[in-house]
């Protein structure tokens, strides 16, 4: 049984920018070890003692909330205070600064870096160390360890593989140790690593070698912030011997291609594997393979899918591997030409590089030991009862609820349940749990929606009824308005007629007064006439008396005439003339008598007539008196009537004003009706729209409930 080691802390190499983290748990999904991330809160946190520093989350986090903790700031500070520093550059600089990596080294030196070493030569030393280990100990399995993420994984999660980790440093540490051992002028210099990797920093703390792990990504940012144009920088070369082909070490399979030079056929007993999706499950399976002796001799493994050239600290994560590796291959070719000569003979190359490597290699110098950090993983495994409780809390009721969909970031429901059991996650982050909650809410929403729909339909019906009643009201109001209009017109016409009658009556007031006056005058005149007639009758009576006198005279004359004629006849001829005169006088007296008789008769008639006229006149006077009196009464009544008419006519103005007000009010009512009608129409349209949305919502909810 594996002895449990004490917990050991590991240097944090990845941080979470809480301001950017949206708690999407993509990082958990890509993290090969999962339980280093606490997803139970509002933001994720990292347990550095479980994080292997693979950088997968840095690449996967679309929010850029995952950042590599490197030593850019301390390095720049150290440079600023004149600290002596040498740099060890990873092969990835060639692909990260294509065509300009020598100028980048020139810039480093211009900043005060004393020398730049090529880690590829350290890879040559590493191959030598590996082969030495194989030759010396004939191990059943050697796991290459250039990758600190893989080292950390085995230390924490697969300690049973620790005996098979190559007991030799990574190429980087080979280079650092070589500098300290073989370049005494730099022995006391601090070492800067121009690094493609977040986890490299851990090698420093684990081995005590190396000081500043600054990623190529950070250098790119520094150059940009300082507006450094690399094309204007002087070129500089590495200060150590070049590699032959070990520059390939940074690419997948590069170790084998290099080792093949010195141990032909080694590929046949080797496994090349990279990428977090593959390499960690592979390592998990390795103990079993080992147990069955089915393992390869050499496992050439890297965490990053395209090797260190596309490590999380490079600028190549999205680059084409073909383009990226072309720069590496070109450098490998240059190295081979340098060692193998024009003939490109492997034998010559091997011989030449062996000679150089021998100068910088010695047994024990590059040995590496590892620590069992499995105690860091204090993961409690829930028993069946606890598991059942957790699943119930996750609203999983039967096996069908174990979707193993990986939406929580773990590969299985069991993985999530373990995380929950260890307070590293919560049920709310399970896809199914959320779905169940949504379903519950859907039921509530469905119910609410149904009730809402019913209410809307009722409102629609009510508003429809109101609209119908409003229409009836409109028709009634319209006829009322028309009636008012007609009545107003009739009243106005009547008032106009009254006004006209009043005016006319006022005009007749003078005539009525004049008539009364005329009647009174007629009565007076009639009285005067009566008096005159009475006087005339009296006169006629006088004439009658005179006529009697005249008759007497005429009778006496006639008598005289007859006496005269008798005297004249007695006188004979002498009385003849007298007789004639007497005749004449008798004739005259007779005529007068006749005339007087006639006159008397006439006077009698006149008197009778006057008498009769007097009666008539009296009657007439009486009639005139009555007429005058009646006309006076009539004039008074007429005057009163005119006064009433005038008063009525005056009242007509008030009625007209009232009608005007009635019209205004009526118009206002019409406008209010129009507004209400418009609003009701709008409300109706709105409720219809709401009803249609409600229908749509109901259909959607129904389809959601179905799915
Ligand atoms: S991937 Fe991880 S760090 Fe990035 S936002 Fe999502 S939860 Fe946060
Ligand atoms: S660096 Fe790797 S191990 Fe660490 S949290 Fe990110 S994905 Fe997980
Ligand atoms: S069902 Fe839930 S717990 Fe299971 S894998 Fe999917 S999200 Fe994770």
Image (tube, helix red, strand yellow):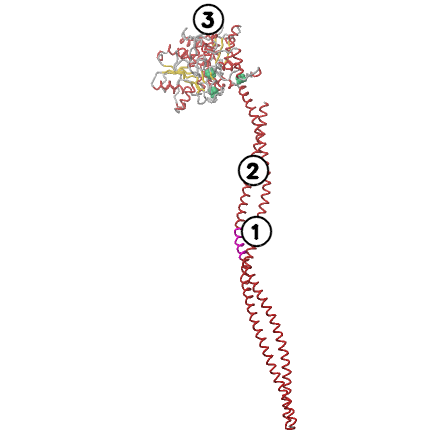
- The x and y percentages for residue 448 are 56, 27
Disc 3 element: helix
Contact, mark 2 vs mark 3 (Cβ under 8 Å): no
Query: 16 or 187, which is in the foreground?
Result: 16
Q: Is residue 644 magenta?
A: yes
Q: Is residue 19 magenta?
A: no
* Picture residue at 58% right of the left edge, 37% below the top: 466
Q: Earlier in the sequence, mark 2 or mark 1?
A: 1
Disc 2 element: helix
Labels 2, 1: front one = 1
Which range of residues does the magenta coloring cover? 643-655
Which quadrant would the C terminus be assigned to in this image? top right
Crowding near the residue tagged with mark 3, few <14, some 14–19, many ≥20 C-alpha atoms within 10 Å = few
Res. 406 visible in picture = no
What is the distance, in whole Å, between disc 3 and disc 1 at their CAs?
A: 131 Å
- The x and y percentages for residue 172 are 42, 13
Contact, mark 2 vs mark 1 (Cβ under 8 Å): no
Labels 2, 3: front one = 2
Q: Earlier in the sequence, mark 3 or mark 1?
A: 3
The residue tagged 3 is 137
* Tag shown at residue 491: 1
Disc 1 element: helix
What is the distance, in whole Å, between disc 2 and disc 1 at their CAs?
A: 36 Å
The residue tagged 2 is 680
What is the distance, in whole Å, between disc 2 and disc 3 at their CAs?
A: 96 Å
* Picture residue at 57% right of the left edge, 27% below the top: 449
């Amino acid at each position: 049984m594996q002895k449990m080691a004490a917990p050991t802390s590991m240097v944090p190499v990845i941080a979470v920018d809480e301001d950017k983290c949206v708690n999407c748990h993509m990082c958990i999904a890509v993290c090969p070890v999962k339980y280093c991330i606490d997803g139970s809160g509002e933001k994720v946190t990292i347990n550095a003692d479980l994080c292997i520093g693979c950088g997968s989350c840095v690449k996967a986090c679309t929010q850029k909330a995952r950042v590599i903790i490197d030593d850019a700031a301390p390095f720049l500070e150290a440079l600023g205070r004149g600290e002596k520093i040498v740099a060890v550059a990873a092969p990835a600089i060639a692909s990260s600064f294509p065509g300009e990596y020598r100028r980048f080294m020139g810039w480093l030196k211009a900043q005060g870096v004393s020398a730049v070493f090529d880690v590829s030569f350290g890879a040559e030393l590493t191959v030598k160390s590996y082969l030495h280990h194989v030759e010396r100990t004939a191990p059943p399995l050697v796991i290459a360890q250039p990758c600190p993420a893989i080292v950390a994984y085995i230390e924490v999660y697969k300690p049973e593989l620790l005996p098979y980790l190559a007991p030799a440093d990574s190429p980087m540490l080979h280079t650092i140790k070589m500098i300290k051992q073989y370049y005494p002028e730099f022995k006391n210099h601090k070492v800067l690593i121009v690094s493609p990797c977040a986890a490299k920093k851990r090698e420093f703390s684990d081995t005590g070698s190396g000081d500043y792990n600054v990623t190529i990504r950070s250098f790119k940012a520094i150059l940009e912030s300082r507006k450094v144009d690399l094309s204007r920088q002087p070129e500089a070369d590495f200060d150590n011997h070049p590699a032959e082909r070990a520059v390939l070490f940074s690419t997948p399979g590069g170790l084998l291609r290099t080792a093949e030079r010195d141990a032909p056929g080694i590929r046949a007993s080797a496994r090349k594997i990279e990428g977090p999706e593959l390499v960690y499950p592979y390592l998990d399976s390795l103990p079993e393979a080992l147990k069955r002796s089915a393992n390869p001799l050499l496992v050439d493994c890297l965490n990053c899918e395209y090797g260190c050239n596309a490590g999380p600290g490079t600028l190549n994560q999205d680059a084409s591997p073909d383009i990226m590796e072309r720069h590496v291959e070109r450098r490998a070719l240059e190295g081979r030409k340098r060692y193998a000569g024009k003939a490109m003979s492997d034998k010559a190359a091997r011989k030449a590089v062996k000679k150089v490597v021998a100068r910088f290699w010695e047994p024990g110098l590059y040995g590496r030991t590892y620590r069992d950090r499995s105690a860091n993983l204090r993961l409690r495994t829930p028993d069946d009862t606890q598991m059942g409780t957790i699943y119930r809390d996750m609203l999983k009721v039967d096996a069908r609820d174990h979707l193993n969909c990986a939406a929580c970031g773990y590969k299985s429901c069991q993985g999530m349940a373990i995380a929950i059991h260890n307070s590293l996650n919560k049920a709310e982050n399970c896809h199914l749990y959320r779905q169940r909650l949504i379903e519950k809410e859907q039921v509530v929403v469905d119910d609410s929606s149904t009730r809402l729909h019913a209410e809307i339909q009722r409102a629609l019906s009510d508003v429809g009824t109101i609209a119908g009643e409003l229409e009836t009201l409109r028709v009634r109001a319209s006829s009322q308005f028309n009636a008012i209009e007609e009545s107003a017109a009739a009243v106005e016409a009547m008032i106009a007629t009254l006004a006209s009658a009043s005016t006319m009556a006022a005009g007749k007031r003078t005539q009525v007064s004049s008539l009364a006056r005329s009647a009174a005058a007629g009565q007076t005149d009639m009285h005067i006439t009566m008096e005159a007639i009475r006087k005339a009758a009296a006169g006629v009576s006088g004439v009658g008396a005179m006529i009697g006198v005249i008759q007497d005279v005429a009778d006496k004359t006639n008598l005289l005439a007859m006496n005269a004629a008798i005297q004249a006849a007695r006188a004979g001829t002498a009385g003849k003339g007298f007789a004639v005169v007497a005749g004449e006088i008798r004739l005259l007296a007779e005529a007068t008598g006749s005339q007087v008789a006639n006159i008397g008769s006439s006077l009698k008639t006149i008197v009778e007539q006057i008498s009769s006229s007097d009666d008539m006149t009296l009657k007439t006077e009486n009639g005139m008196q009555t007429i005058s009196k009646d006309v006076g009464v009539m004039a008074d009544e007429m005057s009163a009537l005119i006064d009433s008419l005038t008063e009525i006519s005056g009242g007509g103005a008030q009625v007209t004003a009232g009608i005007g007000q009635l019209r205004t009010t009526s118009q206002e009512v019409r406008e209010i009706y129009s507004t209400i009608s418009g609003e009701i129409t709008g409300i109706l349209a709105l409720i219809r729209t709401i009803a249609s949305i409600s229908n749509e919502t109901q259909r959607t909810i129904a389809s959601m409930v179905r799915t």
